[in-house]
Image (cartoon, rainbow, N blue to C red):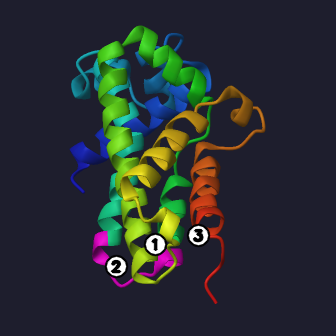
């Protein structure tokens, strides 16, 4: 990876960690620069303003999921459990923090970034479930009541979007990655009702 891109990624990762830990409104460009060991001027060379930095950091979370999907493309032979494990590993890399509060804050401060983030995230989530569902279907793990993919993906996608942001769920101290993992387990072993033998 070129040095310019490495520095940009370093800034985005630092911003995401600081935003999740301290809040979008409270975090300054100086805070992000300090987190990644750069000057404020260097951060501004990469990002025009805080708004651009917020957008890049929030979209980074979607990019992590999309990277997992790209990895699944390289492993088309994976069964349902291997596919789910790969996705769980990817979401486990998401930074920890109070995502539900940050999303509410994002919606208030930057509604256009919030809308873009929600659309991208929903698209990625639906694609994850589509792939796991199709793998399960190939393996004969789908019961007749689960064959309506549109209904199943709508329920799972909505659950993922809103459960992952629920203060009640987050009060249990679960990371977003663990929440995604739990929802995948429910899909694999709750909806499908059994483990592969």
Nearer to me, 159 or 14: 159
Q: Quadrant of residue 7?
A: top left
Q: Which residue is drawn at the image coordinates 71% and 43% (left, top)? A: 174
Please state if 17 lies on the left or on the right of 113 as rendered: right
Provide the residue designation for mark 3.
192
**Marks 2 and 3, Cα distance to the nearest angstrom?**
22 Å
Q: What are the residue bounds of the magenta stretch?
A: 73-82
Q: Which residue is drawn at the image coordinates 71% and 36% (left, top)? A: 169
- The reply to whether discs 2 and 3 touch (Cβ–Cβ < 8 Å) is no
Provide the residue designation for mark 1.
83
Q: Is residue 144 visible?
A: yes
Marks 2 and 1, the one that precedes in the sequence: 2
Marks 3 and 1, the one that precedes in the sequence: 1
**Which structural element holds mark 2?**
loop
**Marks 2 and 1, Cα distance to the nearest angstrom?**
8 Å
Mark 1 residue crowding within 10 angstroms, few (<14) / some (14–19) / many (20+): many
Q: Is residue 64 visible?
A: no
Q: Quadrant of residue 68?
A: bottom left
């Amino acid at each position: 990876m070129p040095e310019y891109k490495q520095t940009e990624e370093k800034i985005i990762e630092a911003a995401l960690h600081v935003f999740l830990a301290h809040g979008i409104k409270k975090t300054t460009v100086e805070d992000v620069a300090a987190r990644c060991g750069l000057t404020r001027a260097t951060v501004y060379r990469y990002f025009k303003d805080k708004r651009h930095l917020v957008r890049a950091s929030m979209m980074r979370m979607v990019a992590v999921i999309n990277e997992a999907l790209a990895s699944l493309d390289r492993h088309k032979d994976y069964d349902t459990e291997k596919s789910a494990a790969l996705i769980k590993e990817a979401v486990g890399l998401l930074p920890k923090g109070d995502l539900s509060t940050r999303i509410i804050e994002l919606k208030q401060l930057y509604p256009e970034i919030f809308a873009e983030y929600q659309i991208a995230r929903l698209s990625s989530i639906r694609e994850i479930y589509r792939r796991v569902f199709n793998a399960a279907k190939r393996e004969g793990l789908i019961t007749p009541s689960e064959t309506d993919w549109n209904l199943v993906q709508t329920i799972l996608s909505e659950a993922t979007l809103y459960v992952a942001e629920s203060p009640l769920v987050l009060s249990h101290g679960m990371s977003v990655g663990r929440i995604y993992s739990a929802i995948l387990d429910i899909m694999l072993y709750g909806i499908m009702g059994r483990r592969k033998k």
